[in-house]
Amino acid sequence: MYKEIFMDFLNELNESQRVAAQHMYGAAMVIAGAGSGKTRVLTYRIAHMIENNIDPFNILALTFTNKAAKEMTERIGAIAGEHEAKNITMGTFHSVFSKILRFNADRIGFPSNFTIYDTQDSKSLIKDIIKGFKLDDKAYKPSQVFGRISTAKNNLISPEDYNDNPEIILEDKQSRRPEMGRIYTSYMNRCQRSGAMDFDDLLYYTNILLRDFPDVLHYYQHKFKYILVDEYQDTNFAQYLIIKQLAAAYENICVVGDDAQSIYSFRGANIENILNFKKDYPDFTLFKLEQNYRSTKNIVEAANSVIKNNKDQIHKKVWTDNQIGEKLEVIRTLTDNEEGRAISAKIFDKQKSGGSFNDFAILYRTNRQSRSFEESLRKLNIPYKVYGGLSFYQRKEIKDLLAYFRLSANPNDEEALKRVINYPRRAIGKTSIEKLIVAANKYSTSIWEVISNFHKYPVDINKGTQARIGEFVTMIQSFQAEVNEKDAYTLAERIAKASGIMRELMNEKNKGPEEVERFQNIEELLGGIQEFVNSNEDDSVKTLADFMLEVALLTDADQDKPEDKNHVSLMTIHSSKGLEFPYVYLVGLEENLFPSQMALQSRTDLEEERRLFYVAVTRAMDSCTISYASSRFLWGQAISCEPSRFLDEIDSKYLSFNTLKSPTRKNAIGNGFQTQRRGGLNKNLGGSTPGNLRSLKEVKRVQNSGNQSNDNTKEIKVGYNVQHERFGKGKVTHVEGIGADQKATIFFPHHGSKTILLRFANLEIID
């Protein structure tokens, strides 16, 4: 019966898909073009393995969102049966390996109920460390420090390796952050004391676990005899190494991805992982899925005509049997505000003729571009949602209640404790909290240990405050005693009431709509926990700790509810990855915006921008409209813009300029096109020892401060020595252009020659 069902499903695949789905043993790579049905192939491949008596308990399938994992599990369940599907280990890297870490937490010095810090928690802790070290928070911006630490961990560089590496130390000095190593060390120590890991730690410590405990590695190598990885082009060095270690025993590994959609280098993803797969597994089998089922012929061919300009790629020819469709319309406007009005008007007119608002998406390169579109959509009463904004679980009232939940499971959680020890207000002042932090650092213990044992850890706090802190401790201990006894909803409701949060919000309800919404958000959270408990299909108790684990590992994609989707979607192109829309509006196609100015320093960066453009165009199913403005209001003044080079790269037969002739422009590549590759923490280290860096660059691309260049940049001449915010000291070797278009080629000892647009450079003459 099952075999018949499977064969019915198998018949839905085209020949290329079917061959890939039926392959089971050895190393395999499936290169899947945009809209080619890779998820279906991955799903059917797993189902086929089960049908051929491969034990689901021996299958590990890794995705990048919980939503994707859930959908795949449901699809496999429909074919092979729900019972079998549930036996597959399937989920995101972070969800799968967090469970492995919880099971083996004692081996690496963590409690099994460790907290998972989100970005906000991490930055708060870093801010506290910077303050404790009495460092300048303008030089040591928490977001930049966090990015630096994140990239180090993604490349498996420990605090010890970091502080012992002369190149890293030199780079930190040049970027005027010589204390980075000390901050990194303190951050790791404070996290461990708090029984907390951040998202990067889930991969970092998994690698340590597999490296230092051969019995653990042996166990999981033989448990996961068959490994499948989705979106392999998005893996970073830490993920790559975990996969490689786990697959080493049997080498039954199948990776699925598209090198043309590798767009996440800024967060550590390394395209070399997919490009060099054949080096790791010389006997691998290659499958190509080249038929696009999503987009029209014009959209597919337009995207192909651009991506073919990349040199670093696995060559394939994406094609489609879909209708020819409309040409890609190119709209030129005078200003960015006019661009917002023009696109909004087009959406208004098209929606009136049929369809719903959820068919439309506006994609842009940077979040700041959303303003003009939001204003114009509002004026036309068009509903919209900006993705990448404040998610439900990041709202203050939600984070406050979640902090109480976290403390109940792990009272050593420092960030959670600091957040709610005086919320609702219980007269425990800021000064007292600071004294508690100092005491915890002095005695190398957690704040919870200090406040639970004032007799053991003396603190200069008056008796009245100590008594109120004691009441707080008693309350948390009462929650703690029930965390493994009561189901998640019962305990959550009790905490919401006993903590005083519900009363606090109830008292504020009459103040205005915002206060009412905050109260309703708490009710929605409790309703979600009730649903979580009710979804349990066995007799086990779903605890609050179980719920917290699920919440901690949610991605933005997981939080989007289909029933709430009746709006135009506004998002960055990065956020649109994996999505599709009938009508896509790709806006802001201007040089220095898209491609980004920061991408014009090397071929590697420019090729990633081109891949990003490819991703944007291939989100469209029926229609893709591209717009650009002749001037854009940035940093307090109007900036002249020229159309993006990517417009020139699209074969003109796929474009339509309705009211304007095809724009002409100067060759934008010029001398700014460099062939050198980026090194440092953003570069994959391959097989080298993580601590041995050849070159360490800035962890995150430096964002312009928002000011125009200093007035003295107009005086810059050949031979001048200058200081750059990112590259340090350098010498001017060439100057060209005039006015706003003036560029300088500068040799930086540690970064080579860079050609920089002076109006954005913020250079300082140091002669």
Image: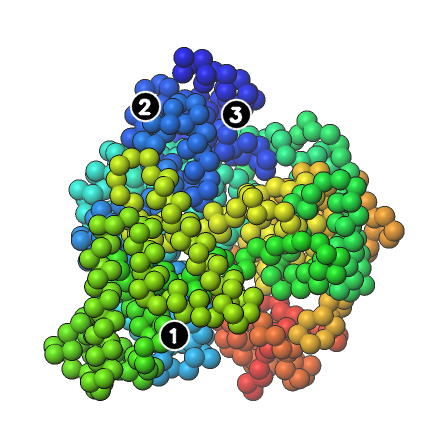
What colouring method underlies this structural image? rainbow
Instruction: Answer left or right for 331 relative to 487.
Output: right
| Label 2 neighbour load within 10 Å: few <14, some 14-19, many 20+ | some
Instruction: Answer left or right for 44 relative to 435.
Output: right
Above-or-below relation of 108 to 697: above
Q: Distance between the residues labelled 3 and 2?
A: 20 Å
Q: How far apart are marks 3 and 1 (CA)?
A: 50 Å
| Label 1 neighbour load within 10 Å: few <14, some 14-19, many 20+ | many
> SS of the residue at dot 1?
helix
Q: Quadrant of the N terminus?
A: top left
> SS of the residue at dot 2?
loop
Rendering coords of residue 668 (x, y %): 71, 59
Please identify the quarter of the rendering in which residue 623 is found.
top right
| Residue at (54, 57) in percent of width and height | 388
Q: Farthest residue in the left direction? A: 456
| Residue at (68, 71) in percent of width and height | 634
Please identify the quarter of the rendering in which residue 162 is found.
bottom left
**Which mark identifies residue 127?**
1
Q: Name the residue under label 3.
A: 17
Rendering coords of residue 409 (x, y %): 26, 57
Instruction: Answer left or right for 169 relative to 557.
Output: left
Question: Of marks 3 and 1, which one's residue comes earlier in the chain?
Answer: 3
Please identify the quarter of the rendering in which residue 220 is found.
top left
Q: Nearer the viewer, mark 3 or mark 2?
A: 2
